[in-house]
Structure formats: C-alpha cells, structure tokens
Image (spheres, rainbow, N blue to C red):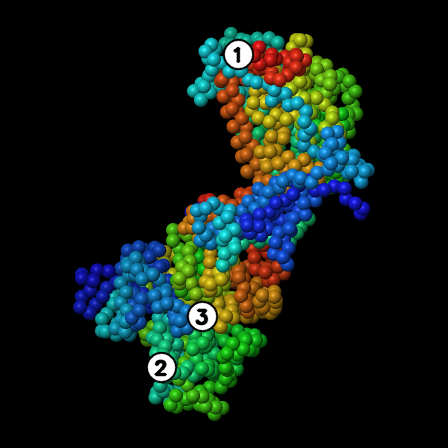
C-alpha cells in the first residue's frame, strides 16, 4: 500500500510538514481560501497539533541531518496490538484512532517503535491517518514538502 | 563604525493577520534576516541583509510576506541616480572593486524585443506541428562541402564529429563550484532526458556525473581546472573557453571557502585554496596558438570529439570568429554581454561587451561572406529568455542556443544577483551543504526538462506558422525577421528589414 | 457454526474454540480469521458482556469512559468475524478433555472442538483474612461487575449525603487504579499493603519511594508493611492494630493465572499454563494465551507470568494463527506498562537488571537498565512521548554500539541511529 516515506538527503528541516499536518487535521473550515484559514486555525482556542515531527541532528559543519517521522502504518502494528481500549485499529492498512474510545493511557506511546503517537490537549492520543478523511484527502505533509523529502508511494 | 550611508534596499512586509509564526522564513534565510522574538511572540526582520531572493516569500505557508523596494529616496537627480550614489558610498567605505553576479541589469536595448517573426498567409501555407512531422534535431560541427555516396546511397565521405541535439538548446557552461552539485546533477539529468547537452564549465567533472557523459560538454579554460584525459574523453564535445559574456577580458576567481573536499577533488586543486582562472590562456596569443590547443585536444581524444571555442561578444567579434573558423574548431560559441556569471566586477559586467543579437548577425554574415560558414557551427548565449529568442537567434544565423540564466530560473533562481555571497537560498550558487540540499535534483531536472519541452513545442509552433518544418530551413533565414523601432544602422548589422518593408 | 445441524441437544461442535473474551481471546479470534475466514469459531466467556476492556473498569468507575466505549472491539465484531459468542455464567468452562477434545460447560453442555485456546485470564487472589466471609461492601477489582458493585455502594453513600471512606488492600496496579478512580469521589482513601513499597511489580525498590511521595501528595494515604488482620462491620483492623472504618473495601492483593480446569486436565503449568513459542500447550491442539500463561520474558531470559494486555493480545493472535495452520511464533514477550495515576505517568518495559543509568531531561526522569550493550529495561517517570523507541531496543535486543546513546537516552528519536538504520526505519515499509 501507499505509505509516507522520508528521504533525509533532501529534507530541509523547514518544519512546513508539521504546520500543514496540524492545519489539515485541525478541522478548520476550507471555504474562504487556505491562507487565512491557516491563520485562523493557529489562532483559535485550540492550537492545532501535528502528527508528524521533524527530527534534527547536531550541526556538522554547515549542515545537519533532518527528517520527518510520522506513523509508518506498520504491517505488525504494536500500537494496535497493545491498545488496551481498542481505540486503535487497522482499516485497509491504515492505522486509525478512535478519539471517542482513546483514554490517553500512553500504552501506544510505549509500544510504537518510531514514536509516532502524539498527545492532544484533550487527554487522547493523535496519530497520522494519512489525511484520507480530512479535507486534504491525501497526506498534507507530502503536499506541503517543498523538496519532495516526504513522499507518498508504494515501496517494497 | 561611523555613519551607515546605505539604507536597506528592500522592506519586508509581514501581514500580522496571516503570520502564524511557524518560523519557516527564519529557518530558510541564509542571510539571517528573520528571527522570532520569544518575549514579544512576533517575527522580526532585519532588512539590511535581505537580497530579495524571495525564498521566504515562496516558502511562507500563509503568504504573510512580501518584499518591496524601499521608497526611501535620495534627492532626485537624473545624472546621479540613487544606485550610482550608493556604489560610490560602498566603495568609499570599503576601498574595493564592486562585485556582482548574473547578467548585465542595465537598461541597454534588448534587440530580441525589437525583432518580429513572420507567419505564412495564403501562399506557402503554415504547418500544424500537431499533425505533421516537425524536425528540431540539430547537428553541431563542421559540415563537409560535398558528400560522396555509394550505389546504395550510403554516405562514404568522412563526416567530422558532430554533436547531435534533439532540440536547438543546450545548457551553457556553469562550473561545479560556481553552482552546486545538485544544480549540476539537475542539469545533467535534464540534458540526458531531453537529448541535449549541459556544460561542465571550467570546474571539472565529478566522477558521479560521468554517467551523463554523452550529454556533457567538457570545458577547458584558462585555469585548466579538472582537465585530464578521462575528462576530455568523458563528454560529447570539448569546449575551449576564451571568454565569457558577463566579464569579457577578465578571468575568474572562485574563493577558497567554496573549495570544499568534493570541489577540490573535481578541480584537482587543494581544499580551501582560491581557484584563479587567468584572464588569458597563457599559451594562446594568436589564432595559431589556439589551433595548437584545438589539435592537442583532438589528438588526445582521437579526433572523435568536436571542439567548441567559446568567446565573449566583443567589438571585433566577426573577425575573431573568422579566425576561429579557420583554426580547426568545429563550433564557435558566442556569449553576449547580458550573459550571467557567479561573480564579476560590476563595472565589467555592466560596461564591457556587446549584445549577442548584433554579434551573431555580424559573425554569421562574415562567415558567409568568406564562404566558411559550413566549416563551423554557431552557438549563441547571453540571455536567451524564451523560445521566441531561440527562433530569432536561429533565423539570425545560429545553429543552436545556450541557456544559463533561464535554466537557473527554472531551478528556482530569483535573480537576486548575490551569487558571489555563496549563500544562495535556492541551493544553486552555493557550496554550503545545508543550502545545496534545498535543490532536489529530481525536482530540478524535471523542471528543466519541463521548460525545454515547453520551449520546443513553442518553437515548432512558430516554425509551423512560418511554413517551415525543420530547424535547418530556419537557420539564417533572416527574411523571416523584421525589425521594429530600429535605426538603419541596426537593421543593416542585423541584416533584416524593418517591419512593413 | 451451524447450530441447527451441528448442535445436538447437549453437544456443540466447533472447529475452533476460544475460551475467554478479553485481549487474548480476541487476539485469537483475529489470528484465526487472518488465516481462515470461515472455519467454525465458538467463543465462550462466563461474563455476560460483549468483549470489553478490563483495564477500563477504573476509568468507567471514575466517570471518564462512557459505558458504550467500554467495548474492546466494535459491537459487530462477532458478526463480522463469524464468531458464535456464548456469554454468561452458563458458559463457564468447568473442565476440558485434551484427549477427546471436549469441554464441559457449567450448563452441562459439551463442546467438541478441533482446536482450542485457553484465554481464561487471571483471577483475583484474596488472602485469608478473619471475618472475610461476613464482610460487607468488599470487592475485588478485575471485572466490570466489581466496578459496578463499587459504583452502587458509592452511590448509596452519596445518597446519605456524604462521600465514602475507601480502604484498598494492595498497592499494586489494580489497587492504585481503583484509588485513582475514587480519588475525587471519596472522603478518604487508605491503601494497605504487606509489601513495604508501592507497585512492586512495576517499580524498583529505589524508585518506589519517589512514586509513593508523589501519590501521597495527590491525596492517597498509605499503610505499607502492614496487612489486614481482620474485617469487622465496615471496618478493618490492621496488623498493627490500627482500625480503619470503610464504606468500600477493595481487595486488590494480586491476581493468579486462572489455570484451574487446565491443570485438572493435565495441561502442564508453572504459575500459569506453559506453552511453546506457538502458544501450544503440551496437549496437541490445545493452546493458551494471555494472563493465564507463563511465557518467555526476552528481557530477562526467564519464563514467567507477565499479565500485561499487549502481550496477551499478541499471544492470542499467535495462538490463533497457529490454530488455523499457519506458522506463527511469539518471541517478543516482555513486560510493558504504561501507568497513569492522578495525572502522573510512569512508563516501563523489560526487566530491571544490569547497570542503572538515570537521565533527567527536565520533562521526565528515566531509569535505564543496561547490560552487554543491550537495554534490558526502563522506567520513565513523567510524560515521555516516543518512549516506544526505547521499548523497541528491548524488543529487538538492539546492539547499542553504533547508536548515539547519549542523544537517545536524553531524547528518544530515530536520529540517534546510524544512517542505514534510519533509512530502514523511515524509508522502508514495515
């Protein structure tokens, strides 16, 4: 299946993916043109939370290694298997989280090998669901990446 | 410190109703213009270092930024314009030669924009390139004066080596060092995909790029950087660089800080050591000397590679070209004064050389008059900005064009003309690793290929309009051109009639 | 399963029998169905509920989870997976016959199966205490019914216009989760444990005091190193003669693997049922998974009972796949716990052997246990996003040489790994 992959060679560490991810999942309305809505989303009562995170290495000369990490949608998803409430599930290969059923117990945090579950501000966990059900329709991080460091494709 | 006479040229306008303080502008500006103030929770800009490269503007997710020219004005003076005064201030404060980059920005005439292209009506009907074959393939090199064929029609004459191009546009010489590895990779991959050539410039050829050899022109310049047998044999042709349109008569200087490990290895010079290309080739003081170098290179490559001689368009360019045509070169490349550069003294860039349009017309005419036009192909560069410029150049007599600046624009360059700083925010004219990786060669090569694919469509469209179905039939076909707003003298040099004639 | 043709009076025939309706049982169902989408599958439980999450009972009692969200799988789970679920005390398995592949139910019915998995979980252990038989309003705390019982008493006391006094025996996971649930609803909570420290199964001796202080600060009252000597009328007397009145008494001294009928059937048991790496017991065709089993803890190399939910599910899944005839191995067992108590989080995994390294990153305090360039285990106090990266080191017995452990132990991230390992993690499918 198509997944989000990262090529650290061309990741700029600009963090746009994080902001676009947070915005895409903020539930902000999408009728009056994107830029203002993004402003609205980030100035609303709840700060949008990104499901993707850019890791930055130490400076080596002029450069540092950067790359973004989001849910790998593992075939053996330890988070799902470990979830004590059944809030995490796999649907057509996509690992989803049911906000209603999650109690924020952090079991998935301690299970996920990649550190891809994040806390929301309302006691539940959030994760990348590939933007398949928000207004973006496909991963916002990939769309936003200025340098194709994040791609959404099939890989073997 | 004293008084700072210089007011920042640009102002950064940040719309607070759009800015989300994501700090992308801060992270992306190598000039450190933007920064986030935690205490005030706002983004702040120090415009003094802004070069208006537009990187922050392009990256801002909410389009909160725009950069505008400052309206702070010195007292108006038609003779002493503000930028002239500022240059005086700058030199008075530093005592140095002013440096700048990319092409001559001054308001000299652009002859391309004063030439119009013909189209067929009624007689000699136009051709629809979507329905009929249209040939844009070009062979560069010496053409034999006669052809012998055997009974089956197979050519038996010995044909001198040729450069075969699918379209009449090549990427001009830009050295590895002046531009980044990723810019080079983008050019190499695009040239390969398009069936044309890119040019190493005088910076040598990194081993990783040998795979693109059939689409590479390797350059030999006065510094001889990175020249060795494998290098000469790696490319499709060898170019001897005698001059460059942006800085005719002077050499080049790549500062030591841009000579990192890889550039050092490729150029075959020590790391951190300034790379100085002398103004002249120290072994060339005559056409005869040039001929010696040409044949040395041909000898070294078994007479399999065409040799290009590149010169800047200068006053007596026609006579020089005539000499080059007789020196054994297969192609002459002429670079006009609007051609780009990674760094040049401002005075040279802005005041030396002549327009490529006039140089081309003069050279083509001279070679024709001397009946040696078939002995050599002509390639022109120095601000070819569009497919229309290409069509006009070919009708004026060129075999093909070199594009440099247009190619860099395709890669993201915004012509901020600050290449000499080495802090190109677009990852093009820099060796700083964090900046180089901003140019993903996969994207760069796609954009370059897109650009030339689009241009080639347009060239076919314009050719079809003229009722011409091959580049060969357009070449030197000056009847297809008319001047507009030009003097008799200009029309005479260009060898074209005025519109209406 | 076709009831009409296959179920004669007192006999039910099934291809697969799953005994248990919690994580391991559900894991087994999913495991079976991942291989065999249609084989007859019977699931039995002595509780009358749709599969629900046991750990959620404290959240339910606390009022943080709506009753409908107690389900461990969607309500159409059985239908979607072709499961015949027989739920309630009638369907309690009384005995199992490994030779003839039959199970006897409390209602007298017999189940004839091809393959079975025992996922009977654990049962609360209540120590012998004087007066226990006549005690009132005392509860164990492992099932929904227990929580419902507590709820009723709390409601009753509330109706009297006051808040209940709560006494909890056991300062382990269950006791403390019960304490958390009632903390805002109780007049007082006193926790008694014979052990001198809290959370003996999760914490080290060195860290228990720290946690106890934090919990005490948040309102819990401890009586450690003591036991309940006797229970009277709504009061307990401790071994040091202190008398504590209570409205609710929760007995959470521990649990034991529920191995009764398995042991009687001759299935080999240690503390729990013993299985091979496919989760099969010594009786061919009979598997076991979850809290009722003992299994290999790869972090310590010892076979032990690890009653933690993720393991239970994975063991169940392994059993299910194996039962359906495909190769599956469970070799990733080790304790993993995430425990939030009154807003204070503790994450732990593995075993606490080897050299202890303590890292305070400002957000949380991490205790790592290291040996032979491997991470054996960790305990983290405070909220530590991405702690699973540490867990994965234990799971894969990752050689720490070649990893920037200074960085990793300070800040869990993929960056600490080498270029190849990073690419394997973020640029390849998993």
Res C162 quadrant in image: bottom left
* Residue B347 position (above or below residue C337): above
**How far from the left and from the top, in percent, is residue A44?**
50, 56
Q: Residue furthest bottom?
A: C241
Label 1 sits on residue: B154
Q: How many marks?
A: 3
Q: Nearer the viewer, mark 3 or mark 2?
A: 2
User: Regarding mark 1 in the picture, which secondary structure is present there?
Assistant: loop
The image quadrant of residue A87 is: bottom left
Give the distance between the C-alpha atoms of the residues marked 2 and 1, in whole angstroms. Answer: 110 Å
Is residue B481 in view? yes
Residue at 74 percent of width and 25 percent of height: B352
Instruction: Determine the residue positioned at 51% across, 67% down.
Output: C347
Q: Determine the chain carrying the residue at label 2.
A: C
Q: Position of residue C428 (x, y in %)?
A: 50, 49
* C-alpha distance separating marks 3 and 2: 41 Å
Few, some or many residues within 10 Å of mark 3 (<14, 14–19, 20+): many
Examine the rendered structure and indicate whether residue B385 appears above or below residue C21. above
Instruction: Give the camera-side residue of B498 and C403.
Output: B498
Which numbered disc, 3 or 2, marks the residue that appears first in the sequence?
2
What residue lies at 60% left-to-right and 8% top-to-bottom? B146
Q: Label 3, secondary structure: give it.
A: loop
Spot occupied by residue C383 in the image (x, y as percentages of width and height): 53, 66
Q: Are marks 3 and 2 on the same chain?
A: yes
> Which residue is identified by label 2?
C159
* Residue lying at 59% horizontally and 62% vertically, measured from the top left: C409
* Residue C219 horizontal side relative to residue B428, left or right: left
Residue A54 horizontal/vertical position (percent): 56, 52
Q: CA distance from mark 1 to mark 3?
A: 85 Å
Task: Say which chain tag 3 marks.
Answer: C
The residue wearing badge 3 is C306
């Amino acid at each position: 299946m198509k997944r989000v992959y990262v090529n650290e060679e061309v990741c700029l560490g600009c963090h746009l993916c994080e902001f676009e991810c947070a915005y895409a999942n903020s539930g902000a309305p999408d009728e009056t043109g994107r830029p203002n809505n993004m402003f609205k989303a980030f100035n609303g009562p709840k700060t949008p939370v990104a499901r993707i995170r850019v890791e930055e290495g130490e400076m080596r000369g002029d450069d540092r290694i950067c790359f973004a990490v989001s849910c790998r949608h593992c075939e053996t998803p330890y988070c799902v298997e470990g979830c004590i409430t059944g809030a995490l599930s796999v649907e057509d290969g996509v690992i989803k989280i049911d906000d209603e059923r999650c109690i924020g117990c952090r079991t998935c945090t301690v299970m996920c090998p990649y550190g891809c579950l994040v806390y929301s501000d309302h006691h539940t966990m959030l994760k990348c669901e590939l933007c398949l059900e928000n207004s973006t329709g496909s991963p916002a991080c990939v769309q936003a990446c200025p340098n194709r460091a994040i791609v959404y494709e099939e890989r073997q | 410190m004293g008084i700072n006479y210089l007011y920042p040229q640009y102002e950064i306008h940040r719309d607070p109703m759009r800015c989300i303080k994501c700090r992308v502008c801060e992270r992306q500006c190598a000039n450190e213009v933007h920064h986030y103030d935690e205490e005030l929770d706002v983004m702040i800009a120090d415009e003094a270092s802004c070069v208006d490269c537009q990187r922050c503007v392009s990256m801002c997710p909410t389009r909160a930024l725009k950069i505008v020219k400052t309206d702070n004005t010195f007292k108006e003076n038609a003779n002493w314009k503000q930028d002239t005064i500022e240059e005086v201030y700058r030199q008075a404060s530093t005592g140095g030669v002013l440096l700048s980059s990319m092409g001559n920005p001054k308001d000299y005439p652009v002859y391309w924009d004063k030439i119009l292209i013909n189209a067929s009506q009624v007689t000699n009907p136009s051709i629809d390139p979507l329905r009929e074959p249209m040939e844009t393939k070009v062979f560069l090199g010496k053409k034999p004066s006669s052809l012998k064929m055997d009974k089956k029609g197979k050519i038996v004459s010995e044909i001198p080596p040729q450069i075969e191009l699918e379209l009449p546009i090549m990427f001009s010489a830009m050295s590895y060092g002046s531009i980044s590895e990723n810019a080079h990779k983008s050019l190499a991959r695009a040239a390969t995909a398009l069936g044309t050539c890119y040019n190493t410039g005088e910076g040598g050829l990194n081993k990783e790029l040998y795979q693109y050899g059939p689409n590479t022109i390797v350059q030999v310049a006065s510094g001889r950087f990175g020249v060795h047998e494998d290098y000469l044999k790696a490319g499709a042709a060898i170019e001897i660089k005698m001059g460059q349109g942006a800085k005719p008569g002077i050499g080049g200087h790549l500062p030591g800080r841009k000579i990192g490990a890889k550039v050092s290895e490729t150029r075959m010079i020590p790391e951190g050591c300034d790379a100085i290309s002398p103004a002249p080739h120290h072994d060339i003081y005559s056409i005869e000397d040039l001929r010696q170098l040409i044949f040395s290179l041909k000898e070294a490559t078994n007479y399999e590679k065409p040799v290009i001689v590149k010169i800047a368009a200068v006053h007596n360019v026609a006579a020089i070209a005539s000499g080059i045509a007789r020196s054994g070169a297969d192609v002459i490349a002429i670079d006009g004064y609007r051609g780009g550069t990674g760094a040049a003294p401002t005075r040279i860039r802005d005041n030396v050389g002549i327009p490529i349009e006039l140089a081309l017309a003069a050279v083509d005419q001279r070679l024709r008059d001397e009946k040696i036009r078939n002995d050599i192909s002509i390639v022109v560069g120095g601000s070819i900005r569009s497919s229309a410029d290409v069509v006009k150049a070919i009708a004026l007599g060129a075999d093909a064009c070199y594009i440099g600046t247009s190619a860099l624009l395709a890669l993201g360059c915004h012509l901020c003309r600050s290449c000499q700083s080495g802090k190109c925010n677009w990852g093009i004219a820099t060796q700083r690793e964090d900046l180089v990786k901003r140019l993903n060669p996969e994207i760069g090569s796609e954009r370059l290929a897109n650009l030339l694919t689009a241009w080639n469509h347009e060239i076919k469209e314009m050719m079809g309009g003229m009722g011409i179905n091959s580049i060969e039939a357009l070449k030197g076909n000056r009847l297809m051109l008319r001047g507009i707003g030009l003097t008799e003298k200009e029309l005479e040099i260009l060898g074209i009639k005025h519109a209406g004639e | 399963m076709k009831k009409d043709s296959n179920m004669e009076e007192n006999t039910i025939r099934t291809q697969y029998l799953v005994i248990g309706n919690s994580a391991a049982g559900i894991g087994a169902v999913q495991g079976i169905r991942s291989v065999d989408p249609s084989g007859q599958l019977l699931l039995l439980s002595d509780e009358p509920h749709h599969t629900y999450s046991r750990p959620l009972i404290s959240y339910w009692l606390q009022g943080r989870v709506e009753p409908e969200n107690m389900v461990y799988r969607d309500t159409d789970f059985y239908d979607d997976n072709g499961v015949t679920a027989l739920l309630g005390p009638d369907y309690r398995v009384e005995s199992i016959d490994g030779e003839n592949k039959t199970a006897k139910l409390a209602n007298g019915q017999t189940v004839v199966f091809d393959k079975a998995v025992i996922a009977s979980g654990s049962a609360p252990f209540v120590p012998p205490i004087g007066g226990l038989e006549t005690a009132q309003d005392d509860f164990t705390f492992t099932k929904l019914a227990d929580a419902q019982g507590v709820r009723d008493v709390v409601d009753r006391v509330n109706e009297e216009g006051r808040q209940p006094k709560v006494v909890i025996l056991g300062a382990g996971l269950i006791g403390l989760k019960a304490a958390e649930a009632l903390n805002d609803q109780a007049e007082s909570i006193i926790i008694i444990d014979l052990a001198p420290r809290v959370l003996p199964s999760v914490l080290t001796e060195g860290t228990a005091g720290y946690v106890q202080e934090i919990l005490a600060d948040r309102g819990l009252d401890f009586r450690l190193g003591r036991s309940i000597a006797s229970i009277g009328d709504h009061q307990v007397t401790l071994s040091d003669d202190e008398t504590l009145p209570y409205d609710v008494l929760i007995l959470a001294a521990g649990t034991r693997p529920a191995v009764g009928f398995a042991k009687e059937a001759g299935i080999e048991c240690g503390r729990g049922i013993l299985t091979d790496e496919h989760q099969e017991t010594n009786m061919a065709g009979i598997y076991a998974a979850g809290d009722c089993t003992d299994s290999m803890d790869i972090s310590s190399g010892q076979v032990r009972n690890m009653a933690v939910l993720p393991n239970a599910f994975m063991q169940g899944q392994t059993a299910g796949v194996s039962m359906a005839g495909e190769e599956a191995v469970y070799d990733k067992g080790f304790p993993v716990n995430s425990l939030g108590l009154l807003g204070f989080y503790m994450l732990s995994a593995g075993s606490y052997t080897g050299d202890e390294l303590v890292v305070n990153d400002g957000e949380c305090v991490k205790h790592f246990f290291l040996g032979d360039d491997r991470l054996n285990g960790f305990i983290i106090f405070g909220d530590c996003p991405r702690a699973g990266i540490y867990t994965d080191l234990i799971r894969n017995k990752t050689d720490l040489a070649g990893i920037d452990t200074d960085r990793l132990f300070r800040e869990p991230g993929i960056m600490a790994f080498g270029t190849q390992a990073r690419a394997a993690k973020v640029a390849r499918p998993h």
